[in-house]
Image (spheres, helix red, strand yellow):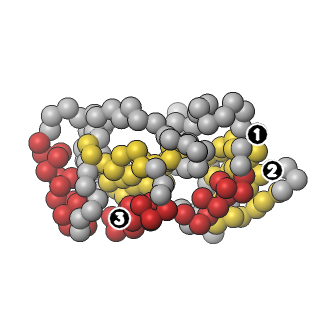
Amino acid sequence: MTAIAELGHTGLWVSDLPRMKDFYTRVLGLQVTDENEAEGMVFLSSRPDAEHHELVLALGRVGGPEVRVTHQISWRVARLEDVLDFHDRFRAEGIQVQQEVTHGNAVGIYFFDPEGNRNEVYWQTGRDVRQPFRKSLNLDQTPDAVLAESDELVAAGGPAYQPVTTGPVLD
């Protein structure tokens, strides 16, 4: 059977295209690769030389923010320091963070975009940890301390998955 190689792109139905475009470009740093105002669509990529678009924003969300149109969009970053930079950026921007976590094999931040879609930025640790494993992690530390805390949480075991019941608070 042919296997999927990687995520190609994700699309979101949105209500406020300019606000969502601003969030994904200014806050997350994606680049607009194509845009059609008449059609109400914006194509975005974190690596436009390799992938034309990884995210499509399209007008047409129906039912308001309580209607979820995705589970999450996960964005891999190259370094743990990048996750910590996003931690600081989200705090400065007032972005709602659901949870800062270790999965053992990754360190990440679950957060919500302006229309309540859950996203994650994460860095792969290179460690082999059985999933699901999700424990809260303190990202107000040095990279070495964050990684040490992650390793301690993995070593401690216990309940592997901590469900989070809080959802987005939208204006």
Residue at image mark 2 = 40
Q: CA distance from mark 1 to mark 2?
A: 8 Å
Element class at badge 2: loop
Q: Is residue 17 above or below residue 156?
A: below
Q: CA distance from mark 1 to mark 3?
A: 34 Å
Element class at badge 3: helix
Residue at image mark 3 = 84
Q: Position of residue 38 (x, y in %)?
A: 88, 53
| Type of the residue with mark 1 | Gly
Q: Position of residue 11 (x, y in %)?
A: 66, 45
Number of other residues with Cα within 10 Å of mark 3, as a class: few under 14, some 14 to 19, many 20 or more: many
Q: Residue at x 50, y 47 (%)?
A: 112
Q: Nearer the viewer, residue 121 or 68?
A: 68
Q: Position of residue 66 (x, y in %)?
A: 59, 32
Residue at image mark 1 = 60
Q: Earlier in the sequence, mark 3 or mark 2?
A: 2
Element class at badge 1: loop
Q: Residue at x 69, y 44 (%)?
A: 14
Mark 2 and mark 1 in contact (Cβ < 8 Å)? yes
Q: Position of residue 110 (x, y in %)?
A: 42, 47
Q: Earlier in the sequence, mark 1 or mark 2?
A: 2
Q: Is residue 162 above or below residue 41?
A: above
Q: Residue at x 45, y 65 (%)?
A: 92
| Type of the residue with mark 2 | Gly
168 horizontally vs 52: left or right: left
